[in-house]
Image (cartoon, helix red, strand yellow):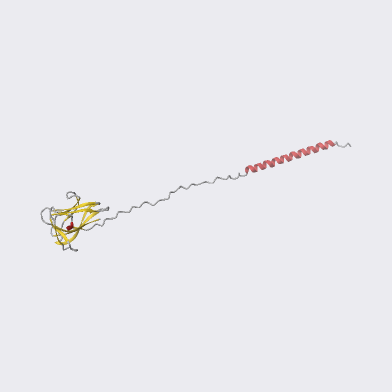
Amino acid sequence: MSQPNPSVYRTKAYRVRQRSLVALAGLGLVAVGYGLGRWQDSPAPAAALPPVVVNEPSVAPSSPAPTTEPPTPTVYPKLEAEAADGNQGIQSQVTEDEGGGQNVGWIANGDQLRFDDVDFGPVPATKLDVRVAGDAEGGKMEIRLDGADQPAIGTLNVTRTGGWQNWRTDQVDITPTTGKHTVHLVFVREDGNEFLNINWLRFVH
């Protein structure tokens, strides 16, 4: 029996090695493909976002609102009738009213009293208190500013008090008045009879 040719063995061994290398190469490619697939399926790491800067609206410091003090009402003095700066047709007499002193009387149609430089101040006067006495019915006392011929800002309608020295305080509404003025009291009656005595007057708010 003849011996096999050694080259045959070498050829077979070479083929076996080649097939093994091909198989290994195939396995390597499969492994590489699997690795690439896993890498592609893995989520990419989140990129760090830049911090968001929120600008707070600038608020200017609030300054306190300016406060304006309300004007102070004037405390009006009592105007004594006998001390008027001017009178027309009026006489003074000793009064029996509380506090004593004098009052003016014998007031009739056309008589007048004048008080200069009466300061009403910044807060308006709205009324006038008048201390009166009389035993007659009818007649008026008109309050006028800055002229005896000016329109009346208020009118007192005279009524009987029960006697010429029986005193009471009557109140008259006037047009709200501020500032400094000359006050005229003008007395009006349809006949010439005397109808009123006055002790004092005082404006009020």
Residue 162 visible to the viewer: no
Residue 32 visible to the viewer: yes
Residue 145 appears at what percent x and percent y? 20, 51
Residue 82 appears at what percent x and percent y? 17, 58
Image quadrant where one finds the N terminus: top right
- Extreme residue toward the right, this view: 1
Image quadrant where one finds the C terminus: bottom left
The answer to which image quadrant residue 198 occupies is bottom left
Rendered residue at 72%/39% (across/down) = 25
Rendered residue at 83%/36% (across/down) = 8
Rendered residue at 64%/43% (across/down) = 39
- 5 or 64: nearer the eye? 64
Count every numbered label the image shows and give the total.
Answer: 0
- 29 or 51: nearer the eye? 51
- Extreme residue toward the left, this view: 192
| Left or right for 107, reference 74 | left
Rendered residue at 23%/52% (across/down) = 180
17 over 128 or under it: above or below: above
4 over 128 or under it: above or below: above
Residue 176 appears at what percent x and percent y? 24, 52
Residue 140 appears at what percent x and percent y? 15, 54
